[in-house]
Image (cartoon, rainbow, N blue to C red):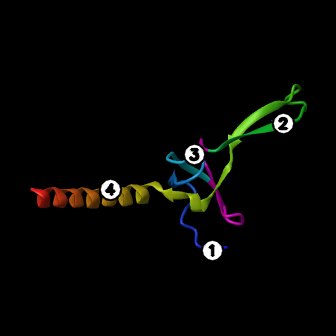
Amino acid sequence: MGNKRHIKKGDTVYVLSGNERGRSGKVIEVLTASERVVVEGLNMVKKHIRKNQDQPQGEIAEREGTLHWSNVMREERYLRNRTAKEAVTTNEADVKAESKE
């Protein structure tokens, strides 16, 4: 288990893998013992609630599930890396185009 934690509550993160890949959201909770995070509006799961006085019919509630923190990256870091890579590939394409001419 890695002890290094790069995500804090309130950070905006980008999902790198899984069903929610390519989406971003705000971190609601960080679970350090299981190395997981809960992201607002992502990885929704259904939880069945039994009948009680408050819900005499019972209920199926939807809430956010957890994602492993290795599958998310802080959004500003992701965007910074992405723009740097795009700049490099654009420069390489320019150089190749000039050499062909």
Mark 1–mark 2 Cα distance, whole angstroms, equals 35 Å
Q: Earlier in the sequence, mark 4 or mark 3?
A: 3
Mark 2–mark 3 Cα distance, whole angstroms, equals 25 Å
Pointer 4 residue: 83
Q: Nearer the viewer, mark 4 or mark 2?
A: 4
Residue under the point 50% across and 58% down: 73
Residue farthest toward the top in the current orientation of the protein: 57
Whether residues under marks 4 and 2 lie with C-beta atoms below 8 angstroms apart, the answer is: no
Q: Earlier in the sequence, mark 1 or mark 2?
A: 1
Q: Which residues are magenta?
A: 29-42
Pointer 1 residue: 3
Residue under the point 82% across and 37% down: 48
Q: Residues within 10 Å of mark 4 (few under 14, many from 20)?
A: few
Q: Earlier in the sequence, mark 1 or mark 3?
A: 1
Dot 2 falls on a residue whose secondary structure is: strand
Residue farthest toward the left in the current orientation of the protein: 101
Dot 3 falls on a residue whose secondary structure is: loop
Q: Nearer the viewer, residue 77 or 97?
A: 97
Q: Tell me the tag on residue 20.
A: 3
Query: What is the quadrant of residue 57 in the picture?
Result: top right
